[in-house]
Amino acid sequence: MRTDTTTTRSTTAATAAIAAVRNLGILAHVDAGKTTVTERILYLTGTTHKRGEVHNGTTVTDFDPQERDRGITIFAAAVSCAWAGHRINLIDTPGHVDFADEVERSLRVLDGAVAVFDAVAGVEPQSESVWRQAERHGVPRIAFVNKLDRAGADLDTALASIRERLHPRPLAVQLPIGTEESFTGVIDLVHLRALTWADDGTLTHGPVPDHLTADTTARRRALEEAVAELHPEALEDFCTHGALDAATLTAALRDLTRTGEAVVVLCGSAYRNRGIEPLLDAAVAYLPSPLDAPPVRAADEQRQQRGADPRQPLTALAFKVTAAPTGRLTYLRLYAGTLRKGDTVLDAATGRTERIARILRVMADRHTETDHALAGDIVAVIGPKAARVGATLCDPDHPILLEAPVSAEPVVTVAVEARRAADTDKLTAALARLAEEDPSLRLATDPETGQRTLSGLGELHLEVAVEKVRREAGVEAVVGRPRVALREALVEGVSGFVHRHAKQEGGAGQFAHIVLDVRPAGDGFAFASTVTGGRVPREYAQAVEAGCRDALAEGPLGGHPVVGVAVTLTDGITHPKDSSELAFRTAARQGLREALRSARLQLLEPLAEVTATVPEDALGAVLGDLAARRGQVQATTLGRDGAAQVSALVPLAELFGYAGRLRGRTQGRGTFTSRPAGYAPAPPLG
Ligand SMILES: Nc1nc2c(ncn2[C@@H]2O[C@H](COP(=O)(O)OP(=O)(O)OP(=O)(O)O)[C@@H](O)[C@H]2O)c(=O)[nH]1
Ligand SMILES: [Mg+2]
């Protein structure tokens, strides 16, 4: 009996511990203030004792020398801190689109996120992208409208832009006190009190000031009505009492955040240390704990699932790997089970086992060691030597394979070569190591020139990689001109294409005869077999599909991947002795290659959606330059502050070096961001 009570007690304690965890991401457009928000959170939670600043390179999460030099976040950084009895595992993500893969991997392991917006700019393009990305991952969000101290900042305009571009139901739970330079605090509309911050960041709670009572009452009423409209129980309460109290509002906002029916909006100025405490309170109150997350499922066997239960078999995903001076650090999100120091775990994809030598909680500039970690937590471990980003580490007796995070396809390639020939191997090794940390970087050899090539998501992505190798491995590299990744799309197919693969002289032969219909379709690859009467057995049809995929890797126009193809196997002949899966796969590869040579294909190039903010007097020059780059201007809007915003679709190939050109045309006052916008027909080579 005694053991039972003890077990029950420890299980309850473990459940309470998991319920108090928040795995939280900070997401937004470049420069919205994610790193500054993170920095203030770490300061307030006592994790760091000084407030670091992005502009002088003293923040905790932008610790890479390149991040400090460039003033941007490049690598997602995970840090743990404690607030109001909760453990918050925080991931500060990069805003620049070239590092979107870091965001994607982070989203896989987060349970909730704070989306940060600039109170002047509102919803910017990359905020929209990461918002949709979070939506795809089912990660609930709250919003923080930052930089309320800036000239032109306005919460209501930012709310309107959220409503227009992201979500029909942004619900502000705060009202700013003062504007711009005189922004000093917020009214908490849920608890009807004023929070004000002194210049040194000290927070004082007080009553709502007289001049704001009318506005406060009106906004509180509007909040209650909006919540009642969306939440059935709140509606019942509202109808009975004619109002909603703080507890009901909080509970309803928490539900609406988790279902995604509404977005709670807070505001402040991270730089001026205003608004961070209530943001932490909101994250704890509204965003889900690991217990609220749906169980994870096995990639191959959807019925196999595991929830955030420390007694279940260990299930963890490695979402980040870094080569720190202390050794290789592997960051894990634990989904189920308990991880103990000294455990042997199985890398489910490779079948290798790894030993967990140490378990660390990363706290700003130091690590604290722990002997175990429970389901739901995010920790870093030392010991695993080979586990890659995306690996599932699990209990060797109860294997499970989780789906690995999907990596974006590289769009830009450069040739790289060591400046000194003697460094060639060192360079290759260093780049290969980088590609292990960042799966959106690919290292290859150009089959024609024999040169080493590095591919990634953009110019900056590759520049950062080469610079990292220079700084960390001490190898200087010479980098060629960037090229974009082209594709070949099928425009007109062929039907009834016959191919016979036969090698039947002596020994075991190879025989396969196939008939293919090849049609343009969508932007991927589809395969079907309509062969009847068992003329081609199912395994051979599957081998034909595999052979088609082989053929599509290199198209006839220039060896680029072929897209938009539907292949139907309509007939075939087998030989009782000489047919095999290999023979059919070879037949399909050769056959489809040949079929494509007689079909019509079109070269596609990647496009980018460019948003440039430029002074009005430079608008003409900027538009002219975009036209010269084959850009299609989609909209031009004039702002209140003498700045114009241009959005345009521009072939990525024409964007190389654009940052410098834009600075030139605008005397350094213009800025731009870009994001991938699919593929479009490329002009004929010439
Ligand atoms: N005026 C004002 N400036 C701010 C505020 N918060 C951040 N900044 C400044 O905005 C700039 C960008 O801030 P970061 O915190 O680096 O922004 P980020 O979102 O992390 O940027 P990336 O990681 O590069 O996407 C820095 O110069 C900050 O000092 C704020 O509340 N008010
Ligand atoms: Mg940052």
Image (cartoon, rainbow, N blue to C red):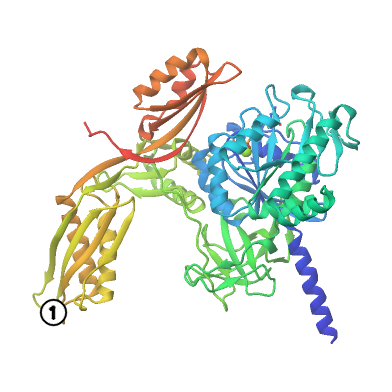
* Residue 51 image point, x, y percent: 76, 36
Locate the N terminus and report the quarter of the image it occupies.
Answer: bottom right
Residue 359 falls in image quadrant: bottom right
Residue 580 falls in image quadrant: bottom left
* Horizontal arrangement in the rendering, residue 41 relative to residue 385 (left or right): right
Q: Residue lying furthest bottom in this view?
A: 1
Q: Residue at x 60, y 41 (%)?
A: 64
Helix, strand or loop for disc 1: loop
Locate the C terminus and report the quarter of the image it occupies.
Answer: top left
* Residue 566 image point, x, y percent: 27, 57
Q: Is residue 398 positioned above or below 59 on the image?
A: below
Q: In the image shown, does 377 or 280 lie closer to the viewer? A: 280
* Residue 537 image point, x, y percent: 24, 77
Is the distance from the Cβ of mark 1 to the nearest ligand 1 atom less than 8 Å? no
Q: Residue lying furthest top in this view?
A: 617
Name the residue type under label 1: Gly
Q: In the image shown, does 662 or 354 lie closer to the viewer? A: 662
* Residue 136 image point, x, y percent: 53, 52
Residue 609 falls in image quadrant: top left
Tell me if mark 1 has few (under 14), some (14-19) or many (20+) residues whose alpha carbon lies within 10 angstroms of its own. few
Q: Residue at x 64, y 36 (%)?
A: 117
Q: Which residue is mark 1?
A: 507
Look at the image and tell me whether residue 365 can be seen: no
Q: Residue at x 80, y 54 (%)?
A: 237
Indicate the quadrant of ligand 1 in the picture: top right
